[in-house]
Image (cartoon, rainbow, N blue to C red):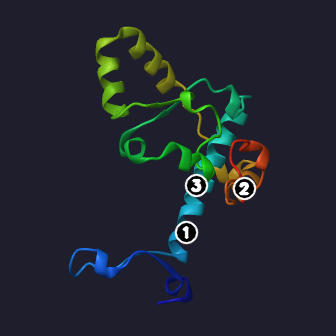
Amino acid sequence: QDDAELLAYTIVPAEDTPADTGPICITQRDVAALLQAKGVIFSALQIVLARAGRQMTDVRRFFLAGGFARHIDLDNAVAMGLLPDVDRSRYSFIGNGSLGGAVLAVIDSEVRAGLDRLAAAPEVIELNLDPGFMEAYTMAMFLPNGDPTLFPSVEVR
């Protein structure tokens, strides 16, 4: 084990877990992976919106799908900087979004036509080549973000 694995916080001690499972811990490596993932997610959202000439506050509705949406605590996700700090009513949890989209494409010709237009003109965004990505990513590695103006409802302690 390296030093990153040696530094850990026990969330549930071994005596409170099922037999032979051991304690539930979070390591320094776990925290680093979480920060990297949330940094990429938030900065990618910023870059995509910037390419469209928009900001987080311009988005009327954020759709969260699948197991991610089913198990996420929205306030905690915003507090850590994973999701934008916008009015919580602008978030919609849609369950299995891919299945719902496929069904809509089959039963609604307008939806299908819209999907065909999107498929005909994809735009590839290589985040690592975007001039603003590294700064956005670096700022997003902080909790909740290096730019506190992006998270006005989050109280920093």
Which comes sooner in the sequence, label 3 or label 1? 1
Judge whether residue 22 can be spotted in this image.
no
Q: Is disc 3 surrounded by few (<14), some (14 to 19) or many (20+) residues within 10 Å?
A: many
Q: Is residue 6 left or right of residue 135?
A: left
Residue picked out by circle 3: 38
Residue at the left extreme, as displayed:
19
Q: Pick whichever, 73 or 107, lies toward us.
A: 73
Q: CA distance from mark 3 to mark 2?
A: 18 Å
| Residue 133 screen position, x and y as percent | 72, 51
Name which quarter of the figure residue 46 lies in: top right
Q: Element at badge 3?
A: helix
**Image coordinates for residue 152, horizontal then vertical, percent:** 74, 42
Residue 144 appears in view: yes
Closer to the chain start, of discs 3 and 2, is 3
Residue, far top: 109
Answer left or right for 53 relative to 101.
right
The residue that label 2 is drawn on is: 156
- Relative to 38, say whether 31 is above or below: below
Q: Is residue 48 above or below residue 154?
A: above
| C-alpha span from label 3 to label 1 | 11 Å
Image quarter (top left, top right, bottom left or bottom right) of the C terminus: bottom right
Picture quadrant of residue 70: top left
Indicate the secondary structure of the residue bearing disc 1.
Answer: helix
Q: Position of residue 8 (x, y in %)?
A: 50, 80
Identify residue type, mark 2: Val
Proximity of marks 3 and 1: CB atoms separated by less than 8 Å: no
Q: Which residue is mark 1?
A: 31
Q: Is residue 72 above or below residue 117?
A: below
| Residue at the spot 51% in from the left edge and 43% down from the top edge | 74
The answer to whether the residues at label 3 and label 2 have Cβ atoms under 8 Å apart is no
Describe residue 148's horizontal placement relative to residue 16 as left or right. Answer: right
